[in-house]
Image (cartoon, coloured by chain):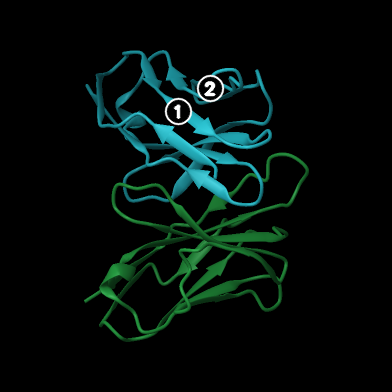
Amino acid sequence: DTGVSQDPRHKITKRGQNVTFRCDPISEHNRLYWYRQTLGQGPEFLTYFQNEAQLEKSRLLSDRFSAERPKGSFSTLEIQRTEQGDSAMYLCASSVAGATTDTQYFGPGTRLTVL
Amino acid sequence: GDSVTQMEGPVTLSEEAFLTINCTYTATGYPSLFWYVQYPGEGLQLLLKATKADDKGSNKGFEATYRKETTSFHLEKGSVQVSDSAVYFCALRGSYIPTFGRGTSLIVHP
């Protein structure tokens, strides 16, 4: 068990550029979540997958954001035409769907800075 | 919608002091409740959890009891250490969307 990994750890981009982040969940975890965290705030839910199906999307997720999990394993989060307000830490978490707790395990995050 | 309210920080304590970080929630149904900890420069780690009313979660000397009547899940530790300095997040899982509080920073001085 190597934990949840995210790549890259840091990304600096210019406004208007597209960026893509990758998340590799813990093996056998069938749920995968994306969050955004800004300074002084808790994680804000963006979207989640169960296997390859995207089951829920937050209203925070504008049309410029898209997430995929094509084979039910790793996931990508793409932000098109980045804006300065997109600067944040993007967190990925994974879990095993269960009847009660659905405990999530978080990756280290990707810090995005939009200049 | 669901919400989590945590006491504002920073909470500053001396080593071996007693710690309480308050957390209250609003949710429909019977959510599961969690405390996560984020050490400087690291990702969030699950600290403890409780899945039903009156359950007590515990780990590393930290405890929290799921109080449905007061919709609370306060985090406590009897004797904090400098190494406990971190940001603590209360969270709930109700329907599908997990909800986190804003976090409470804890600073423990020797």
Q: Is residue B4 above or below residue A61?
A: above
User: Which residue is nearer to you in this view: B29 or B104?
Assistant: B29
User: Which residue is nearer to you in this view: A3 or B51?
Assistant: B51
Q: Is residue B75 above or below residue A75?
A: above
- Mark drawn on residue B64: 2
Residue at 67 percent across and 70 percent down: it is A73
Colour seen for chain A: green
Left or right, B22 with reference to A100? left
Residue at 32 percent across and 14 percent down: it is B16
Q: Chain of mark 1?
A: B
- Amino acid type assigned to the residue bearing label 2 in the image: Ala
- Amino acid type assigned to the residue bearing label 1 in the image: Cys
How many angstroms separate mark 2 from mark 1 (CA)?
Answer: 10 Å
Residue A6 image point, x, y percent: 48, 66
> Residue A87: in sight, yes or no?
yes
User: Dividing the picture into quarters, in which one does residue A84 lie?
Assistant: bottom left
> Residue A27: in sight, yes or no?
no
- Mark drawn on residue A17: none
Closer to the chain start, of discs 2 and 1, is 1
Q: Is residue A27 above or below residue A10?
A: above
Point out the image quarter for the N terminus of chain A. bottom right
Left or right, A60 with reference to B110? right
